Amino acid sequence: MGTSDRILAAALRSFGTTGIDATSLDALAREIGVTKQAILYWYPSKEALLDAVIDFSAVELQRRFARAIEVGEGFERIEGVVRAAFRLAARHPAMLGLMREVNRIGPPTSTRLTESVTPLLTAAAAWLEVEMDAGRLRRHDPKLLVLMAYSSVTGLATEVEVLRALGEEPTLASLVRRRDQLIDLLRGALVP
């Protein structure tokens, strides 16, 4: 893995777990064993590094979810997407944490992420509309449903302190339980 990729990976981990504001280029440099100037050679500012991390994450999210969206019919496809999201949360928690952080800080940074994933969200809403029209899923607002599912997955997978306050420790078993409960909730709401 080249220096640029190592910087990108470390920045994603830090932005997604420690937070964007709490991440310093000095700390990143120490973590990966380069100088701050090496980071600035590849990414001229923390904002440029954040933009590169967002772009990388958006491509990765699209890649992972594009596959899940194309498998199965009706609720089977929804379940596959939810499982893919929780798999991402288990294997790459920083990526969902980054999404939470980017949305928290708002525009213009959140606009970059939103514009990158809008085609995927639009395709998901359009597919839901077709499934509802065909009677395979109960009628709901497809765009609102996509937003609710996104918010639920992001919250259930990344809001560790809220989970702890509710007596839920952030373990793999707990993550699987939360995933299964969300699938059951969605099944009850959507399957006719």
Image: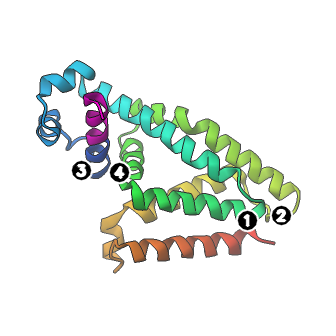
Quarter holding the C terminus is bottom right
- Residue that label 1 marks: 75
Residue 191 image offset from top left, x and y in percent: 76, 71
Range of the magenta residues? 1-11
Label 1 with label 2: CB-CB less than 8 Å: yes
Question: What amino acid is found at the position of numbered circle 1 in the picture?
Answer: Phe
- Residue that label 2 marks: 136
Question: What amino acid is found at the position of numbered circle 4 in the picture?
Answer: Ala
Image point (81%, 56%), residue name: 131
Image point (40%, 58%), residue name: 91
Residue 42 image offset from top left, x and y in percent: 26, 21
Residue 92 image offset from top left, x and y in percent: 39, 53
- Residue that label 3 marks: 18
Rounded to the nearest angstrom, the CA distance separating label 1 from label 2 is 8 Å
- Is 158 placed above or below 28 here? below
* Main secondary structure found in the magenta portion: helix
Label 2 residue SS: loop
- Is 176 placed above or below 38 here? below
Quarter holding the N terminus is top left
